[in-house]
Amino acid sequence: MTLANVKFSLILATVGRTADVGVFLERLSCQTYRKFELIVVDQNADDRLKPLIACYADRFTILHCKSAVGLSRARNVGILRASGDVIAFPDDDCWYADDLLERVAELFAADCGLDGVTGCPVGRIYTRLAGASCIVTKWNVFYRAISFTIFLRAHLVRVVGTFDESLGLGADSGRIAGEETDYLVRALSHSFRILYCSSIGVFHQEPPVLYDDCFNRKLYRYNLAIGHVLRKYRYPFWYILWTWCRAGGGMFLSAISLNCAKTLYHYHVLKGRILGWLS
C-alpha cells in the first residue's frame, strides 16, 4: 500500500463537549495529509454539534451519526460506517499535530506487515505510557496503548470485530476503562503485529489529579476494568500479583510518609484491581 492509498477513518465518539470538539475539527482541517474521513458519533440528546459540523463540512468528509450513551457503543456504531484502510479512535478532547496523519500513513506504507500503530499521549500525567518504540505484546499492552493514539488496519478490525460494550465510559457495568486494552489483546491473540511508536504523539487535555472522593471513585471503577481484563484473558497469577504489589507498594510508601490522600489513592487502585479480577 503506497502512501497516497492509505485512507483514514477517524471515529470520534462524543458527548457533552462542544468547544473541545471544535478544537479537534480545527486542527484536523490543518492536516498535511488529506485522505481521511471523520465519523462523528454523537451521543448528545440535543443537536448542539450540528452548527459546528456544518462549518467544516466543505473542508473534509464528515459523517454525523447518533448513538446511545456509552463509549464502546458509539465506537461500534462508527466501525460499521468506516470505509478507510486505517481506523482510529480520537477522543473528543484530544487534537493532532498538523503532520500526524502523514507520519502514521508513512509508517503503514513503509511496512505492509504492520497491522497497527499505537502512539504516545502528550501530557505529564501519561508518563506511564512513555518509553522506547517496541512491538506491542500481551505483557506490555497496558503500558503501550491508549485509545486515542491507536491506528489499526481495517482488516484487523474486520477480524477482531466490535468493542466490548461492558467496558469503557458509560458502560452499564461500571467498568469505565479497558475497552482498548481488551480490543488489542484480542488482536494480539490473532497474531496481528502492532507497533508502539514513541514519536507518534497525540495531544490530550490532562485530567486533574485531585485525590478527592470523586476522583477515587472514578479510579476504583477504572481499575475494576483492568482487573476484569486480566481475569478475562487468563493472565498468570504471578502477573496479577505483580500488578497488585505495585499498587500495594505505593499505598505502603504513602502511608509511612503520612500522605493520607495518596494512601487512599493507591488503596482504590488496589481494591479495584482485586475486585475486578475476582469478578
Image: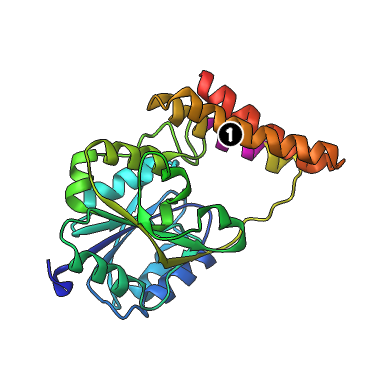
Residue shown at 60% from the left, 60% from the top: 206
Q: Quadrant of the N terminus?
A: bottom left
* Secondary structure under the numbered disc 1 in the rendered image: helix
Q: Vertically, is 195 above or below 30?
A: above
Residue appearing at x 14%, y 70% in the figure: 5
Q: Which residues are magenta?
A: 217-224
Q: Can you say whether 249 is above or below 54 in the image?
A: above
Q: Residue at x 62, y 32 (%)?
A: 245
Q: Is residue 220 magenta?
A: yes
Residue at image mark 1: 221
Specify whether 250 is left or right of 200.
Answer: right
Q: Is residue 212 left or right of residue 30?
A: right
With respect to residue 95, does 58 lie above or below? below
Counting from the top left corner in percent of width and height, residue 24 is at 44, 69
Observer-nearest of 164 and 109:
109
Residue 275 appears in the picture as rendered: yes
